[in-house]
Amino acid sequence: MVNSEDIKINVGLSLKELRINKGLTQEELAEEVELQPNTIAKIEVGKIYITSKTLAKFCNFFQVSPIIFYTPKVNLNIQENLDYIQEINELLPSCNSKTLNAIRNVTVIMQSSQ
């Protein structure tokens, strides 16, 4: 069963993951999206809800769909998944930039549909 606290936490985890993957501090992100650093911190730990205006700022900045923030994160470390990851990592270096971009686009679409 989903509750509002779970949603806030998931939004926060998603934001933190996007921020870290882009190599930004909370302060840098806050400046980019015109929010206070303490607001970013509170969102990331699930203490406050975000408005649709703030959600749009994040989506535009990170160039992601809003669904990214509301899709539950399932991190199953089963061997089959680890084997797939290893195989993909071995294949990627042989791809050209056009192929890598296509793979990235497919991956983003697949993640947003989960």
Image: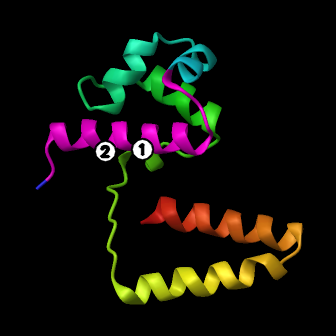
Q: Horizontal and vertical percent for residue 24?
A: 59, 31
**Helix, strand or loop at disc 1?**
helix
Residue at the far left: name it.
Answer: 1
Q: Is residue 23 above or below residue 95?
A: above
Q: What stretch is highlighted in magenta?
A: 2-26
Question: In the rendering, which numbered label is found on residue 54?
Answer: none
Q: Horizontal and vertical percent for residue 106?
A: 65, 69
Residue 23 colored in magenta in the image: yes
Q: Horizontal and vertical percent for residue 18?
A: 52, 42
Q: Is residue 111 above or below residue 99?
A: above
Residue under the point 59% across and 14% down: 31
Residues at circles 2 and 1 in contact by the CB criterion of under 8 Å:
yes
Which SS type dominates the magenta stretch? helix
Residue under the point 82% across and 73% down: 99
Residue 3 shown left or right of residue 52 in the figure? left
Residue 22 colored in magenta in the image: yes
Residue under the point 45% across and 82% down: 82
Residue 32 shown left or right of residue 99 in the figure? left
Circle 2 is placed at which residue position? 10
- What crowding class fits label 1: few (fewer than 14 Cα within 10 Å), some (14-19), or many (20 or more)? many
Gap between marks 2 and 1, in whole Å?
A: 6 Å
Residue 76 shown left or right of residue 84 in the figure? left
Quadrant of the image containing the N terminus: bottom left
Which of the colour schemes (rainbow, by chain, secondary structure, one colour) is used? rainbow
Amino acid bearing label 2: Asn
**Helix, strand or loop at disc 2?**
helix
Amino acid bearing label 1: Ser
- What crowding class fits label 2: few (fewer than 14 Cα within 10 Å), some (14-19), or many (20 or more)? many
Q: Horizontal and vertical percent for residue 52?
A: 43, 25
Question: In the rendering, which numbered label is found on residue 14?
Answer: 1
Quadrant of the image containing the C terminus: bottom left
